[in-house]
Image: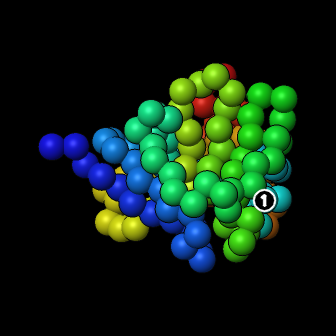
Amino acid sequence: MTKLHHGGCLCGAVRITVRGRLSPVSFCHCSQCRRQTGHFYATTDAAVDDISITGEEAISLYRSSPEAERGFCSKCGSALFWRADHSGRMSIMAGLLDGPTGVEGGYHIYCADKGDYYTINDALPQYAASSTV
């Protein structure tokens, strides 16, 4: 049986359903993620083909780099996802998902850009940039 994960934005205009397994949570400390959320991104990844979204008319897209875009709810402002072009995967904000999710923390990325107002105090791997570098 395929596990379903459901979630949505703060106002409920956008709902997301993910079929199947979610990746461990990635904590991104880059300056773009911090500016968009006020802290750092906490995302879980899934294959784009395993994600269904309702309320797409409420989603605004922001091209944050030549390679990727960010989606957010145009009604309540909730950050929804980060999607690299041509990757076949989408990073979904972990906080959108209705619990329990069963996902755990995986690693921290772009720690070199981390804000100076907090400390990473867990034992998860930390990468100065991307985890694939």
Q: Mark 1 is on which residue type? A: Gln
Q: What residue appears at the point 54 percent right and 27 percent down from the top-left corner?
A: 88
Q: Which residue, as the protein is rendered here, is positioned at the far left?
A: 1
Question: With 106 as the anchor, is 119 left or right in this view?
Answer: right
Q: What residue appears at the point 59 percent right and 75 percent down from the top-left corner?
A: 10
Q: Quadrant of the N terminus?
A: top left
Is residue 121 visible in the rendered image? The answer is no
**Residue 130 versus residue 77 in the image, above or below:** above
Q: Quadrant of the C terminus?
A: top right
Q: Secondary structure at mark 1?
A: helix
Q: What residue appears at the point 66 percent right and 44 percent down from the top-left corner?
A: 82
Label 1 crowd (10 A; few <14 / some 14-19 / many >=20): some
Q: Position of residue 12 (x, y in %)?
A: 54, 73
Q: Position of residue 35 (x, y in %)?
A: 82, 59
* Residue linked to disc 1: 36
- Total marks placed: 1
Q: Quadrant of residue 98?
A: bottom left
Question: With 18 as the anchor, is 74 left or right in this view?
Answer: right
Q: Position of residue 50 (x, y in %)?
A: 40, 38
Q: What residue appears at the point 39 percent right and 60 percent down from the top-left corner?
A: 6
Q: Which residue, as the protein is rendered here, is positioned at the far bottom?
A: 11
**Residue 90 versus residue 95 in the image, above or below:** above
Q: Position of residue 62 (x, y in %)?
A: 80, 47
Q: Nearer the viewer, residue 20 or 30?
A: 20
**Which colour assignment does the render follow?**
rainbow
Question: With 133 as the anchor, is 55 left or right in this view?
Answer: left
**Residue 84 versus residue 104 in the image, above or below:** above
Q: Nearer the viewer, residue 76 or 39?
A: 76
